[in-house]
Image: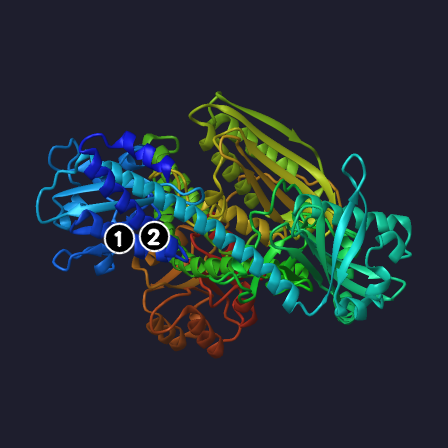
């Protein structure tokens, strides 16, 4: 007290007798209030009440923690006059504004109380202004542990000027509060620690023992002795206290030196570092599994708590036996350390005995840290307790097998929460799903082809009728013109264009598989070489053609379709390189595919002998989205008027109709490569090239009835047939035509009829005519019909079935063939 008085005299020099007396009395009031406090709450309540009366202010408050970076703060305790309620009274969280944070930072950095209001450089902040504060004094209180507190007084009734002595008194009170808080916090912690150990020793139901560690001169543990044990320890171990108290562990247990030294090191480390441990073990002498926990109440001493787990271990062994019999991977891993605690036989057979290792290091490959797809975060609820199971599918990075995984958080045998996964191999199912997807994709492609085929048939019918008129009248006009004249050459170009248009219709029908094609044994190298000669003349010299064409046997194909394939693929390659130039590669070679080949397994190509046609370019390539669509009808990457989008669809249709396969490889910036595989046939005989020899058109004098609902076609055929010497009756109405024939059946040597006509189709007309006169020769023509083909037509008695457009040379030969019985 004398020291305190001397200290205070140095603080208060003005009006020393009065101020010193008042200060001492006031500080003694604070001290008495603090001495009565039993805990932190008492200090807050009693000290605030005392200081409130000392300063005669309108409000005094205390808040904790004092953190200017927090979004809000709450007044912990408060004393105030009724007419000036505060934040504590209203139970409010106050927002941490920029101004209030600035005030708090100033107080935290100041060693003296800070005043705000009149005659001070500090202004009242926005929060204080809300509570009618006209002047205030605050100080930060810093206990030895924990966050700082903030202590302050308000004057609301008038603008009070805080004197220097009041500030010093407030500062001294702050020192007292800090000292009281420190003492109570320390006392509270000691009481908690004492209570913790008291409860531990009085309530523990398991066996426990109290030990002292024996160290050598270097401070390393070499033994430990028993100081005290409870009855449960005696019952658990069969060791009586009177025989073991004061004795070292090396005399109590007769285990091997290695086991005893392990215990000494473990427990010695606990007693010297204070770090607790828990582990399990087996006492062979007692045939007992146990769990032991060790902790240190003070340096050099430790307490062990033993639990008999013979029963839990037996349950675990039964659990292991069941899990080892499952045809699924089952493992358990610590959710914090990722240590594998258990893996069943299924897993051990694949990954080996990996217990004790990290799951992400052993069950996966290439991981340098816990797997990014780890499910730990999905297995606990909001209270960090085991939640619902989580099911997912995953392809393991070690085995490359697919698994359906069922993960769940469970309590392990030692009480900790762990992750248990049951993973069932579903690779076969995944492969089946993949195969199903392939089949579904093929089915979708078939549906597309069927839909486009319906459209193609309609186009072919109408277009061939139009072409018949164009080409027929052009031929007639050529016949009336002087050969090699200007008019003749113009008409010849019209006829050539008609041929190209007829080929286009053929392409449409080819990719929709609705045309009759001339499949025959051919040597593909001859057709491809001929096609490349034509290409060289039409492709600019900026594009180099690199060919490697080998004589590789024969295939069953239509020569014109094979020609069409090479032309389409090479034209696409040219378009990919026309801006920058490059190299067009064409390779033809024989290849044999076995059942183990990549081609057989991945592309579903049956084993056997094939020819491989490869067309490549060094163009800009395609992205994955484009690759997925290139064989779709009407899909094109070309500009307007540059392509129809039918080329690759036609190629795809032709190749598949031959039982072949097509695969495309492409990357952006790296060009494109088409691989086509077509089945070879056994014979490798040479094929002679057929050349058309100019010949005189066959003529006749017979009577022909021609029927077609297209008037211009009837007129055209009338002219053509008359020019060949025949007597022609031309009609545009099929019903009237039948009545004409029925009226005089023997008057007609031949009937030529269109297929698609109103009221009575060509097939119906033919059947009616044959019913009247069965031996009547009939030629049926059509632009396209999905209801009738050549075989069906001949089956009902029709002699010939031909597709439009029909040129003069062809119809002349067919008529003579039918009339002459060929």
Q: Earlier in the sequence, mark 2 or mark 1?
A: 2
Q: Which quadrant of the figure contains the N terminus?
A: top left
Q: Position of residue 570 (x, y in %)?
A: 52, 34
Residue 325 seen by the camera: no
Residue situated in front as seen by the camera: 272 or 599: 272
Nearest-to-viewer mark from 2 and 1? 2
Q: Residue at x 45, y 23 (%)?
A: 580
Q: Which residue is mark 2?
A: 32
Disc 2 to disc 1: CB gap under 8 Å: yes
Quadrant of residue 166 within the rendered picture = top left
Q: Is residue 715 left or right of residue 205?
A: left
Residue situated in front as seen by the camera: 194 or 749: 194
Tell me how far mark 2 sits from mark 1, CA to CA.
10 Å
Residue farthest to the left? 158
| Secondary element type, mark 1 | helix
Q: Position of residue 375 (x, y in %)?
A: 56, 55
Q: Which residue is mark 1?
A: 50
């Amino acid at each position: 007290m004398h020291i305190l008085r001397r200290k205070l005299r140095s603080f208060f020099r003005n009006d020393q007798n009065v101020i010193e007396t008042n200060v001492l009395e006031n500080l003694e009031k604070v001290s008495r209030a603090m001495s009565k406090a039993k805990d932190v709450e008492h200090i807050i309540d009693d000290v605030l009440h005392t200081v409130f009366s000392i300063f005669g202010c309108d409000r005094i408050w205390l808040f904790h923690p004092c953190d200017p970076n927090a979004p809000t703060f709450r007044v912990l305790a408060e004393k105030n006059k009724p007419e000036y309620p505060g934040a504590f009274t209203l139970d409010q969280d106050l927002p941490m504004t920029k101004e209030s944070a600035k005030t708090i930072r100033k107080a935290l950095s100041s060693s003296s109380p800070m005043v705000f209001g009149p005659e001070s450089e500090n202004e009242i902040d926005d929060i204080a202004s809300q509570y009618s504060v006209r002047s205030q004094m605050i100080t930060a209180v810093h206990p030895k542990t924990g966050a700082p507190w903030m202590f302050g007084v308000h004057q609301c009734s008038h603008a009070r000027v805080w004197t220097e002595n009041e500030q010093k008194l407030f500062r001294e009170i702050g020192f007292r509060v800090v000292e009281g808080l420190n003492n109570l916090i320390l006392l509270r912690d000691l009481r908690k620690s004492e209570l913790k150990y008291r409860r531990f020793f009085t309530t523990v139901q398991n066996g426990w023992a109290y030990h002292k560690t024996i160290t050598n001169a270097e401070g390393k543990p070499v033994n430990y002795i028993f100081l005290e044990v409870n009855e449960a320890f005696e019952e658990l171990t069969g060791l009586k206290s009177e025989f073991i108290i004061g004795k070292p562990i090396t005399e109590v247990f007769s285990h091997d030196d290695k086991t005893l030294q392990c215990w000494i090191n473990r427990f010695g480390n606990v007693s010297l570092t204070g770090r607790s441990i828990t582990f399990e073990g087996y006492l062979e002498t007692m045939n007992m599994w146990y769990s032991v926990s060790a902790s240190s109440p003070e340096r050099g001493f430790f307490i062990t708590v033993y639990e008999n787990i013979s029963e839990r271990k037996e349950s675990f062994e039964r659990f292991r036996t069941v899990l080892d019999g499952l045809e699924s991977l089952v493992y358990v891993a610590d959710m914090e350390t990722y240590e594998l605690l258990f893996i069943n036989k299924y897993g051990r057979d694949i990954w080996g005995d990996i217990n004790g290792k990290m799951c992400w290091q052993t069950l996966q490959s290439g991981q340098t840290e816990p797997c990014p797809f780890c499910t730990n975060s999905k297995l606990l609820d909001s209270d960090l307790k085991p939640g619902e199971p989580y099911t997912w599918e995953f392809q393991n990075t070690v085995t490359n097998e697919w698994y359906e995984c069922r993960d769940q958080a469970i309590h392990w045998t030692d009480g900790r929460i762990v992750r248990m996964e049951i993973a069932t191999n579903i690779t076969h199912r995944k492969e089946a799903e993949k195969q199903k997807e392939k089949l579904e994709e093929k089915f979708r492609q078939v549906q597309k082809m069927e839909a486009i085929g319906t459209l193609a048939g309609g186009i072919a019918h109408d277009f061939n009728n139009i072409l018949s008129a164009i080409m027929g009248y052009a031929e007639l006009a050529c016949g009336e013109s002087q050969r090699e004249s200007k008019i003749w050459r113009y008409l010849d170009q019209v006829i050539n264009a008609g041929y190209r248009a007829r080929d286009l219709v053929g392409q449409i029908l080819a990719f929709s598989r609705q045309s009759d094609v001339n499949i025959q044994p051919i040597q593909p190298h001859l057709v491809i070489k001929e096609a490349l000669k034509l290409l060289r003349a039409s492709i600019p010299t900026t594009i180099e053609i690199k060919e490697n064409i080998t004589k590789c046997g024969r295939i069953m194909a239509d020569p014109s379709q094979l020609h069409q394939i090479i032309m389409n693929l090479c034209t696409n390659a040219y378009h990919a390189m026309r801006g920058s130039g490059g190299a067009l590669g064409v390779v033809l070679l024989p290849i044999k595919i076995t059942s183990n080949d990549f081609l057989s397994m991945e592309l579903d190509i049956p084993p056997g002998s094939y020819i491989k046609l490869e067309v490549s370019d060094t163009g800009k390539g395609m992205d994955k989205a484009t690759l997925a669509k290139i064989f779709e009808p009407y899909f094109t990457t070309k500009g307007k008027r540059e392509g129809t989008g039918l080329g690759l669809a036609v190629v795809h249709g032709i190749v598949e109709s031959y039982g072949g396969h097509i695969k495309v490889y492409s990357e952006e910036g790296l060009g494109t490569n088409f691989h086509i595989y077509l089945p070879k046939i056994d014979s490798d005989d040479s094929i002679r090239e057929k050349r058309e020899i100019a010949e005189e058109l066959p003529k006749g004098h017979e009577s022909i009835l021609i029927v077609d609902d297209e008037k211009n076609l009837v007129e055209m055929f009338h002219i053509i047939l008359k020019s060949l010497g025949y007597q022609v009756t031309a009609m545009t109405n099929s019903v009237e035509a039948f009545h004409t024939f029925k009226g005089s059946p023997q008057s007609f040597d031949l009937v030529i009829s269109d297929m698609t006509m109103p009221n009575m189709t060509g097939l119906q007309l033919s059947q009616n005519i044959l019913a009247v006169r069965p031996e009547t020769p009939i030629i049926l023509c059509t632009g396209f019909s999905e209801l009738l083909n050549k075989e069906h037509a001949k089956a009902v008695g029709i002699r010939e079935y031909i597709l439009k457009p029909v040129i003069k040379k062809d119809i002349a030969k067919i008529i003579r063939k039918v009339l002459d019985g060929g």
